[in-house]
Image (cartoon, coloured by chain):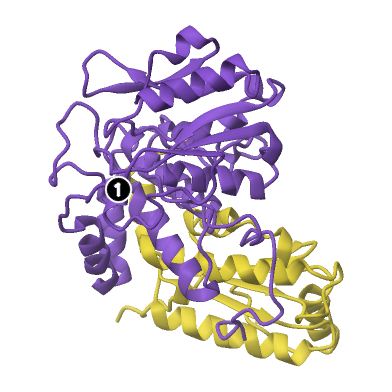
Chain colours: A purple, B yellow
Amino acid sequence: MNELRAKAKELLTNGTVKVVIGYIESTTPDRTKPFIARTAEDAEKLVFNKYCVNNLALYLTRKEFRRTGVVGIVAKGCDVKAIVQLIQENQVNKDDVYIIGMNCNGVVSELGQDFSAETIATKCLNCSVRTPLLYHTLLGTLEDLPKREDKNFVLMQKLDAMSAGERWDFWEDEFERCVKCYACRQACPLCYCERCIADKTVPRWIESSAHTRGNFSWNIIRAFHLAGRCIGCNECERACPAEIPLSLLNRKMGMVAKKEFDFVAGMGLDTPTLVGTYNLNDNEDFIK
Amino acid sequence: MEEEKQFEPKIAAFVCNWCTYTGADLAGTSRLKYSADIKMIRVPCTGRIDPVFLIKAFEKGADGVLISGCHPNDCHYNTGNFHARRRWILFRQLLDFVGIDSSRVHFSWVSASEGKKFVDVVTEVVNKVKEKGPFTRYAKINKEFVIHE
């Protein structure tokens, strides 16, 4: 923590970065919240621990940071994947971001609970980027991760074994609760469209009232717009007040992208985006 | 004796202006007959077909969807169908995962000179959707929610 503060202070004082986006302690020590450090004094408040769950890459595409100059960001491995994906999609200029990479020892799934094998976030269980792929400075040391069963994956297998009708019933139960608050969209670092298709009214493709029909189209389209782009930070699921297992949809699309195209989002600056490109030899055995 | 009502599927067909639509035109001018269960919607290119169109079609009561465009390398805009193909590979499996059986969604390449193929594709799609029966999932939801538009 001290090295993070020292580094942020150094960067802010010598003018390498204009701001550092990081975490500070919130109401209790087991809660953190995003914070934008602008001065060396601000940097003294920064923390990094197992309760730093937010994906701060979200802020990089915000208008206020577009012209700020170089933005420093405290990023875990998964957050760096989001940054890489944003750079790939030309939403963030590679030279305008200074990544303070953190070696990550897992985070909690929800704030306000102690970190343990029970409460570690699902995304951390099979994490391959505990040391970020891309960074300007790397801080922290790696420790062993607590292990538990990946319930999400078990559920996924259960769903895959079902018939289409049964799956519909499962999702109908889940989507029924959606209140169309769009928290999933707001929390997603890759949902950066200035005007979302859900907000378009002429024509209105996705019905705005919170009934199951519109909820289906919203959640399907949200998942599709993230296909081959979602980096699996699961912020959508964490933000969802209705506790819809949105990560299942994203994870499914991730698995399809891996299976069909051997593609994983956010893993390198030299791989082009999945749906922005095509291959002459793409599978077409389903086309007559 | 009550006459058994035969199921007439509603099938939305999104077809590209340059190949399949022209192919359908050729089928017409060649006096080839194809099912009237197909409701054709002309789009500039298969790349124009947003997956939300398919969902809308199902919401509005379609039992099946046909998507058809130019053969690979024949696209009027060079790459539209390649981009579309990649999206469909992903989208089909997403549809399956949320419980909309992707076997209700049919894809084909039909060029402007393939009037006969268009008729064959339509016949096959209509038969397959008839086999599957009506798509009742959205109908059930639609009944529960009266929506004024």
Instruction: Read off the residue under disc 1.
Output: A245
Q: Between residue B126 and residue B114, name the one nearer to us.
A: B114
Asked if residue B2 lies left or right of residue B148, the reply is: left
Residue A274, percent across and down? Answer: 61, 62
Depicted A87 relative to depicted A74: above or below = below
Depicted A201 relative to depicted B131: above or below = above
Viewport quadrant of the N terminus of chain B: bottom left
Look at 47% across and 78% down and name the residue there: B129
Look at 30% across and 58% down and name the residue there: A126
What residue type is disc 1 on? Pro
Residue A51 in sight here: yes
Depicted A106 relative to depicted B5: above or below = above
Residue B70, percent across and down? Answer: 77, 77
Depicted B114 relative to depicted A147: above or below = below
Asked if residue B77 lies left or right of residue A256, the reply is: right
Residue A122, percent across and down? Answer: 26, 50
Residue B98, percent across and down? Answer: 37, 60
- Subunit under mark 1: A
Residue A253 location, quadrant: bottom left
Q: What SS does tag 1 mark?
A: loop
Viewport quadrant of the C terminus of chain B: top right
Look at 35% across and 50% down and name the residue there: A247
Q: Between residue A4 and residue A109, name the one nearer to us.
A: A4
